[in-house]
Image (cartoon, coloured by chain):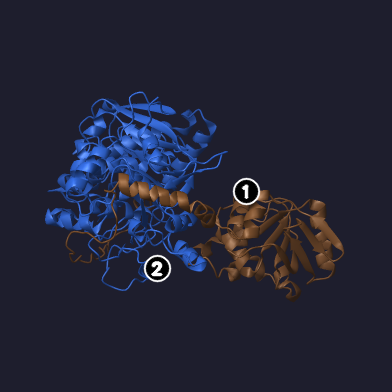
Amino acid sequence: MEKLTTLTGVGVPLRRSNVDTDQIIPAVFLKRVTKTGFDDALFYAWRRDPEFVLNKPEYAKGQILVAGPEFGIGSSREHAVWALHDYGFRVVIAPSFADIFYGNTAKNGVLAAIMPQESVELLWKLLEEEPGTEMTVSLEDRTVTCGDVTLPFEVGDYVRWRLMNGYDDIDLTLQHEDDIAAYEKMRAEKFPFKPKTLPVKQEPEQAIESAREGEYPNWQGPLADRGII
Amino acid sequence: MGTTLAEKVWADHLVRKGTDGAPDLLYIDLMLMHEVTSPQAFEGLRLAGRKPRHVDQLIATEDHNTPTVDIDKPNPDETSSLQLTTLEKNCKEFGVRLHPLGDADQGVVHAFAPVLGLTQPGMTIVCGDSHTSTHGAFGALAFGIGTSEVEHVMATQTLSLKPFKTMAVNIEGELPKGVTAKDIILAIIAKIGTGGGQGYVIEYRGEALKKLSMDARMTICNMSIEAGARAGMIAPDEVTFEYLKGRPHAPEGDMWDKAVEYWKTLKTDDDAVFDKEVTIKAEDLEPYVTWGTNPGQGAPISATVPDPESIADETERNAARRAIDYMGLKPGMAIKDIAVDTVFIGSCTNGRLEDLRVAASIMKGHHKAENIHRVLVVPASSRVRLQAEKEGLDKIFKDFGAEWRNAGCSMCLGMNPDKMVARERSISTSNRNFEGRQGKGSRTHLASPAVAAATAIRGTISSPADL
């Protein structure tokens, strides 16, 4: 995962509270088989509206989203963070975040920065007065700088450490690689009979006949529609 | 103080004990994979430039959205087709063993592994599917995980987990004739509720279980998740060893002896204490059927649809009201008076050989009732299908007027074309009767294969005793 220490990019004011993950990415996109390429799905419904903030050319290349309280409520879908990330957002600033969404951000290299409502309002004002304004987020200093204004944000020590080092969950587990290797050595000695899926062992291969669908030309529909329970 | 079976298996897989409230790091012996919850996990590995740590502890098959007819023709469903070709591509790229549609070992992910002998006592087994609890029937600690965790297991062969609480469900006494594993688990869920097992690993115990086959034990453990439990387990015994012996991946020779010696230690100590205990009297049980829209809304087959107004708890009262309305039933009507359109026999709950044998033995010499629209018999795996054909069960089903389908999840969750239309009513041997589960607006009554077969003969919900 890419490290995140300092980021300078276009700030996007999203004057909405309780932005739920269905708005961030609708369920229909969950059928995909990838975990990238969700940039087109981000705020899919809102982007049909020409007045939506991301449809203004000055904000189109946004990297820092500034939103209202309770960002990311609703379904647990990790796709919401993937979509923000794929669009280009590495930082979301808001007065508060939903728990599951907050947990998913750090796992995927996105910073969820918590700021008081007044700071968010000030940033909205600055970003709207001059659309396309660049801001700088410093994880090192835990500050956001926009023009002449520098404001502090909140981030937990553990999340900050993860993001600055670019560690995902797997990296964190692999810090205990020695323990895993030691366990595997013990396992091979104490439990030599544990099964392996390779090489393949199976009963002889046999052809499977293809079934055909039954035909019911005379079916009159559910009994309930004919008044029968 | 002694320890429980679940705690023993946990302890034997502990890579690193978490301190200061951090989770434990647990070793995973085997991960089962399928087309729906694996694509992003593979892509995650690819993006990070990682490889599976132990490709010989992974195995995949195709089940959730595979068709159960015309498997020799191109798949007409775009999403399904994309997920299947993606799985095939991923397995090839990473070297993961795959049993695709058309292969003799293809089948529902929880049915194909035990048949191959890959599910063994004392293992930790995971899969991106909640019914992974099925494998607990062998005394394995087996549970469902999310896609990010699937990626984590591929990369590290471990999972970070907080220990589960333990619950004993004691099934005391003898089972009456005609009462099966499905009735036991439906009765347990009706008793403790769909959230009763939350945070627990359930260990099913008692004399009645010792007489049950592995197929029956899998039915019980399979539905642990419907009681909210993370996993369900049954201590291994001679029935378990007998089932495993000679299977393709079972240990052989000296290794078999060594394995059995270890497997025999996998039981709860007499002085161990569970966090919670529940007791069910087997002799009081009769066939169970659900009347509502969650698996806890079930009742004995001789009962009536409850009157919501008589339910004291407000949340449950409202839930019952909504469920009865959705199901198109009337409070107080006899369950046995309910006529059904469709009969579904299959799934990871009840699509194994014993289930098909029971259904066939009841259907033999009969024909489906006039009002029954269709009877789908869907073996859980292709090996089950082959064996059933060897025993002539397919002929019995066809003579009965049933469809004999190819293996897969099928109408259990309606991800493939096997769906019902709105207001169509089924008696189903599957595991979930949620609103819309078997098709938008569909109405599902969960029951055992014996009850499903008897219902198919009479047209209304029936037990074999009614024939």
Hey, what amino acid is under mark 2?
A: Asn
Q: Nearer the viewer, residue B341 or B189?
A: B189
Is residue B305 in view from this perspective?
no
Where residue B259 sits: x, y (%)?
A: 24, 43
In the picture of the structure, the residue carrying the numbered disc 1 is A99
Quarter of the figure with the C terminus of chain B: top left
Is residue A199 in view from this perspective?
yes
Q: Is the residue under label 1 in contact with that under label 2 (CB below 8 Å)? A: no
| Badge 1 element | helix
Q: Residue furthest bottom?
A: A57
Residue B90: mark in rendering: 2
B401 versus B178 height, above or below: below
Q: Which chain is brown?
A: A
Displayed quadrant of residue B307: top left
Left or right of B261 on screen, residue B293: right
Where residue B143 sits: x, y (%)?
A: 40, 46
**Which residue: 39% across, 59% down?**
B415
Residue A165: mark in rendering: none
Mark in the foreground, 2 or 1: 2
Q: Which chain is blue?
A: B
**Which residue: 15% across, 45% down?**
B361
